[in-house]
Image: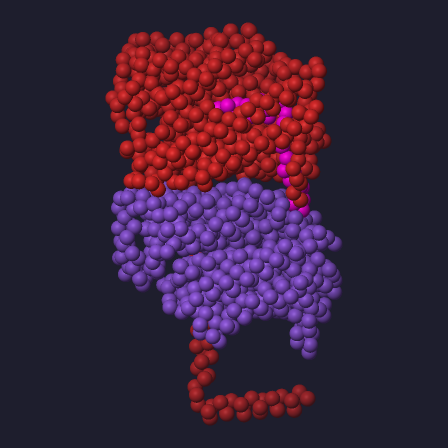
Chain colours: A purple, B red
Amino acid sequence: MSAVLIGLLAVPLVGAAILVLVPGPSRWPWYGPAVSGVTLVLALALAASFDYGRAARPQFELDRPWIPGLDLRFHLGIDGISLPLVVLTALLTFLCFLYLVRHKPDGDRFRALVFTLLVLEVGMVGTFLALDLLLFFVFFEIVLVPMYFVIAVWGGGGRRAAAVKFILYTLLGSAVLLLGLLLVWANTGTLDMVRLAQQHGAGMSRGVQILAFLAIGLGLAVKAPMWPLHTWLPAAHTEAPTVGSVLLAGVLLKMGTYGFARIAIPVAPEGAAVLAPWLGAFAAVGIVYGSLACLAQRDLKRMIAYSSVGHMGFVLLGLATLTPVGMNAALFGNVAHGLITGLLFFVAGGIKERYGTADMSRLGGGMLARLPYVGSLLTFACVASLGLPGLAGFWGEMLALLGAFQPAPGLSRPLFLVFMAAGGLGTVLTAAYFLRMLSRVTHGRPTALTALPDEGPYEPEETGEVTPAGAAGDVTPAGAAGEVTRPGAPGEVPPPRAALRDVTAYELAAWTPLVILTLALGLWPKALLAVTDPVVQAFLGAR
Amino acid sequence: MSAVNALPGMAAAAVLSPFLGAAAGLLGTRRLRGGGPPGAIDRSAYRRAAWFAIAPTAVSTVLAVWGLVVYLGNLPPGFTTYAPPHAGTRPPVGAIEGTLSVIGTGAVPIGVGLRVDELAAVIAILVACVALAVQIYSVGYMRDEPRYPSYSSFISLFTSAMLLVVYAGDLLVLYVGWEIMGLCSYLLIGHWWEDRANSRAAVKAFLVTRIGDVGFLFGIFTLGLAAGSFRIQVVLEKVPEMSTGTLVAATMLLLLGVAGKSAQVPLHTWLPDAMAGPTPISALIHAATMVAAGIFVVARLYPAFLGARPTLDLLAIMASLGMLGAALAALAQDDLKRVLAYSTISQLAYMAGALAAGSDQAAIFHLVSHGAFKALLFLGAGAVIHVVGSNLMSDMGGLRRSMTVTFPAMTIGFAALMGLPPASGFFSKDAVLAAIEHAAASAAPLTDAAAWLLYGCALLTVAVTGAYATRAWLRTFFGESRVRHVPLPEPEPGVAHVWDGREAPASMLWPIGVLAVPALLLGFTGIGLIEWSSAAVSLLVALLGAGAVYAAWRADPMADPARVLGPLRVPCERAFYVDAVYHRLFVAPVLWLARVVARTDDTVVDGAVRGSGRLAVDVSGLLRRAQTGNAQLYLTGILAGVLIIVIGTVVLG
């Protein structure tokens, strides 16, 4: 079965290579969905044959010498905490390709986009499969380059600056991460994550562990992102095309927090114990700070980006508690945030595509009348994101707060109670900004979209009365699919003056799985907790 | 005993049935806007939605009733349903529990399970019955509403969530239902979202209750970790072992959630605004069921509250302020629905007062009878409002002749509200007053000051209740008609339906008529709780308040009897300016802070990043000076370097 792991990496890689070597497939719109679909099937097969009885141990392991001189090994494997993320990655990539079939971002180089995304998938999946520290680092780095190009080539108006900021920031983080990994290697003589996790820090003095946790943690915190290292995120999200935002929020941010759970905490437990209060403090500040920043945002995508700062704050807070429940919360929150924020960015992208802007004051109100399906889906995604019980977002947040209520022995409980209170305040603020946004955008009567000359030469569409909404609702999703025009991107192509079209079949196909999974995980959180809990217990077991 | 073992399964069916109905209603009915021109109604989709709404709720009602019958049929011998309030709390009767699965979280596990006991069985019947009445009523009320399917589906979802709260066997399962109720409340208050005011009211309701809910969740954590389990049964069993500090902390935190959900001071401000929703919603969610959930939860965890005296004192103070303040506010309102909303706050405060005074039975008794008569009053108000075309009582009057069903039904409702015999409110309110009186007379469980404050406020409130109920009754149904047939403020133009006839359609009248029966007769089930001396006192006080208003009205039937309030009238009408104060204290600063953070993020945090970027560029600019492209200079540099190294080696070596 370890061939499946190879397949997960090889299929997108070969798919990308074929695109370069053979010019043909690029004209076939279903090439991307087909390749990523095969990857998804492989991931699902993996999930189906995974032995849930011993989720704590890496399965389907593959351990080959890679660079024997340096004792680097090509070591792959999958266990309870990587399996959900691998499936999530494969799913989100597939949905992005599905969405791209009809909703191509601006720019002609579609073949290059498919190539880039396939390479990105290799890096993302590889990061979650790697069980060797340097292999992890290599995959971690592979991801950056395609994402840089996705933002820089297919992004919005300020894409260059955003892309440069993204790559410099994360490369800087990676450099620190590499130092930390090398420090671990130098002290323990091994790069094998499994062995390191079993040793629980044996072989490293307390000082080394603190240094290692600090370096690795800083590198990962940039990616997560942890306040105050988050400023690359709003810019990148705002400028990235829809699929870029979805993968950035859905998968890339997870690599940071996954690294904490997989490497930083199990490998350097003493360092974690010393620095956990700091991590918790930054997380708590991030929760409140991110939510407050959201309240003042005007741009929909920028608001969602800041909301990620808050949500990842909950994930980091869970990790900082160093308790099994906190770690479970973090891993649950990772997956839930991937699903929900992925959906949010999909919908926000769809809105931007239709209105030609994501600026809330220019969107006007009455989306529920103008675009009932899109408005309803936006409402659903927001409600899920604000952590309503019964939907996936709740369990990660609630368990993180529960972890903070009683942190691991040795950590200051009053301090973590303060963090918990901050988190509670954050949930109220989260509800506040999402509902305010919904109230501004989806409620009210549809107004004429006002033309503001200061933002790009495009012409806003004229939809003064309610009739377009009726017409939009009239289009059954299946019927609309065939006749979707190529969307106008902001700043370059004027959007059609005709009535705005409600959700298309391709959008529905890409979004519905996320809706269903959000509901399913929300109603039955055990599905995920039962998978992650054994690993978490094993990681923290000997403490 | 097999029927008893089937009880959790039956409860699960009662919870799931409306949930499936909601799913079917949302997915199985095409959007009405789809067919034909805007505003046109797709009748077949409408009928389908009505079936999806009514049938599952009816199933739940049957199951809930059957559940109580089975439960009572299997009670241990010698157990009486009602005991006098001063007998203290009864020993807990065995609850029948069923657990579907246990979710390991890494800390305290969550048990996905339901629990049926007397409290749950009784409240479930209330919820299911009122929900059924409202669903049937809505068929007529929302006849021309294009978004009826989503509306009825949200009611179904709400019913399911509330039943989950009632039957929950685990505190976190309860919390799930608790929050979903809040969401449904938000969605339904904002049902007519075209109007910005409705949207704002919906957001306000969600946010204010959410503030409470955060405290509620932390309270659950405190109890759960102290007991080592979130299962209600285990928590209740472990209460005697918990320290007083734990109990006080936990119950105080829970009280926050209770205050939010049950619209108690200081988190009560959302409820009057919530009247922006359709009237049946006000009846179901904002009068009979959801707002009572807070009271229900206190009763559910009552042993924990009894172990925390300071919490009970606080609850007594909150209840005292709430009952009197809200009743005074109700006396000055002109909007009929807002009168009922403030009255709801006041009545809920009665229940809270009974709980503070140590009688959970009186509180639950009043909860059930209030659920019946307040739902009746709201449904009747809905009929009145739609005949008149206005919410304002200054546009009503003289309706007793035309509304031949609504008038007697609402008369029963108002009588119950005032506590006139033989309506249900008379019995339940007296049970509450008797409990408070006992608390004031004996030292337990309240401190003296709190108990006497509570007793004084309760008696005063009885008088004010009599006054505002009489005022509303007189202003609506008596005197000369002031009806002007103004267009409805609520629905869209073309959707509004002002009946030219005299009464509402049968689908609206039937629920009103049927609800009038329990509103009138339910009190007799609790006749054992009544104490005639205190009943006589409160009846007298109520009649005093009513008489004052009647006298004022007789003096000038066209003028508003609220003028008896004199200079207090404006503060009462504005509900003592609490909203404005909260806006100043909380809303404005948070928004200011948000702007500051957004600006800071752009200038300081990101500025530091950009600044370091610029610094790097500047430094590299300095270094660039060295790269002149002059080969001689480079060569000189290399030679100089080699020379320095050589000298260094020689000297140091």
| x, y percent for residue A58 | 69, 60
Q: How many marks can you see? A: 0
Q: Is residue B123 above or below residue B52?
A: above
Asked if A236 appears above or below A25 in the picture, the reply is: above
- Magenta-highlighted residues: B105-130
x and y percentages locating residue B575 in the rendered image = 40, 26
Residue A393 in the image, given as x and y percentages of width and height: 53, 46
Of B121 and B626, the residue lying toward us = B121
> At 59% across and 32% down in the image, what residue appears?
B12
* Quarter occupied by residue B627: bottom left
The residue located at (53%, 57%) in the rendering is: A91
Nearest to the observer: residue B73 or residue B193: B73
Q: Residue furthest left?
A: B484
Which quadrant of the structure image shows residue B361? top right
On screen, residue B295 versus residue A1, left or right, reads left
Residue A147 seen: no
- Please say if A369 is above or below B157: below
Image quadrant holding the N terminus of chain B, namely top right
- Residue at the spot 49% in from the left edge and 21% down from the top edge: B371
Residue B128 in the magenta stretch? The answer is yes
Residue A360 is inside the magenta segment: no
Which residue: 36% across, 29% down?
A: B143
Q: Position of residue B183 (x, y in %)?
A: 48, 37
- In the image shown, does A148 or B24 lie closer to the viewer? B24
In the image, residue B198 above or below residue A66: above
Q: Quadrant of the C terminus of chain B?
A: bottom right
* Foreground of the two, A425 or B4: B4
Q: Is residue A524 visible?
A: yes
